[in-house]
Image: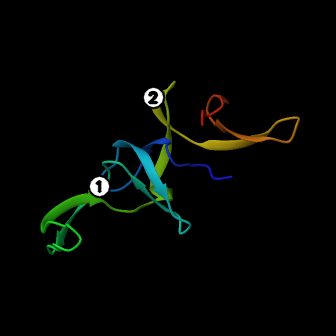
Amino acid sequence: MNRIKQGDEVIVISGKDKGKQGVVISLEKSGKCLVRGIKMVKRHTKPNPQAGIQGGVIEKESMIDLSNIAIFNPSSKKPDGVSIKVSENGKRYRVFKSNGKEIKQ
């Protein structure tokens, strides 16, 4: 079970975007993820009329390493760690390390 999942609210803990918050768009197996509005880069694209792509400078998100982000705890309004607990029936679920509350899916 991953500690950070798609759709989680995260906060950047190191790098040029330190302190910014965003939502995880996608995760890669290489340990990187896309976060909405974080690590924006400019891409220079050629126009492709057959595919309907207009040329120019496009600003989009770039991959950020999972070690540079932490899940955002809404009750404490701070970045927090994630722990995995197992219930009596064997189901695994994620909880915040600071207060032990379950992370909503």
User: The residue under label 1 is which amino acid type?
Assistant: Lys
Please give the residue where the numbered disc 1 appears in the rendered image. 16
Q: Which mark is residue 77?
A: 2
Q: How many marks?
A: 2
Q: Residue at x 30, y 48 (%)?
A: 37
4 w.r.t. 103: above or below: below
Residue sticking out furthest to the front = 50
Residue sticking out furthest to the left = 56
Dot 1 alpha-carbon crowd within 10 angstroms: few under 14, some 14 to 19, many 20 or more: few
* Quadrant of the snapshot with the C terminus: top right
SS class, disc 2: loop
33 w.r.t. 101: above or below: below
Residue 21 in the figure: left or right of residue 5: left
User: The residue under label 2 is which amino acid type?
Assistant: Lys
Q: Position of residue 39 (x, y in %)?
A: 30, 56
Q: Earlier in the sequence, mark 2 or mark 1?
A: 1
SS class, disc 1: loop
Residue 28 in the figure: left or right of residue 97: left
Gap in angstroms between the C-alphas marked 2 and 1? 21 Å
Residue 90 in the figure: left or right of residue 78: right
62 w.r.t. 17: above or below: below
Q: Position of residue 2 (x, y in %)?
A: 63, 53
Q: Residue at x 45, y 28 (%)?
A: 77
Most foreground residue, 68 or 94: 94
Most foreground residue, 5 or 39: 5
Q: Position of residue 30 (x, y in %)?
A: 53, 69
